[in-house]
Structures are given as C-alpha cells and as structure tokens.
Image (cartoon, rainbow, N blue to C red):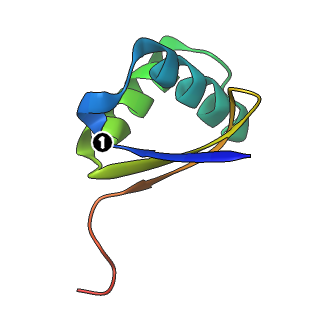
Amino acid sequence: MEYITKTPNQFTERDVDQLSHLAGIGFGQGDSPAMRQDSINHINSSEHIQLALENSELVGFSMVRSCLWR
C-alpha cells in the first residue's frame, strides 16, 4: 500500500476521477456529474488530501482543511 499527501493544486484529472468514483461508491451515487462536482468542491476546499493506493488504484482517501490540534 502506498500513501500520498497532495494539495488541491497537485491533483490531476485521474486523481479527481478516482476520488470521485470512490466517493460515489461510498455514498451510493456512482459516477454522476453531481458527485464529481461535489468531490471537486471538497478537494478545492481542503488544505491536504491523503490518498491510499493499492497497485496504483485509489482505495481510500481523507481530506483535511485545518489541523485539529491548533
């Protein structure tokens, strides 16, 4: 398993596609334009996005807007 941390400006279209797809599965919405736009909105409002990859495929993610311990 590989773990990567990115900022919104480091995201590629493939990153958005994979995150949106995985989020759509989690919310039972599949690959819809609304799910993709919601994912993009959350990516852009985050400071850091952590990605968990297995064989170059996204299997998990988390988004952080600010540190909890400040």
The percent position of residue 63, horizontal first and vertical second, equals 43, 52
> In this rendering, would 67 be left or right of 60?
left
Three-letter code for the amino acid on which mark 1 is drawn: Thr
**Is 6 on the left or on the right of 57, as rendered?**
left
Q: Please tell me in which quadrant of the rendered image residue 45 appears.
A: top left
Task: Give the left or right position of residue 13, taking residue 35 as reference.
Answer: left
Asked which secondary structure carries label 1, the reply is loop
Given residues 58 and 26, the one toward you in this image is 58
Check disc 1: other Cα within 10 Å, few if <14, some if 14-19, many if 20+. some
Residue found 49% across the figure and 24% down from its top: 15
Relative to 49, say whether 18 is above or below: above
The residue sitting at 34% across, 51% down in the picture is: 48
User: Disc 1 marks which residue?
Assistant: 7
Q: Is residue 16 left or right of residue 2?
A: left
Residue 8, placed above or below residue 2: above
List x then y, in percent, for residue 54: 76, 36
Q: Is residue 55 above or below residue 46?
A: above
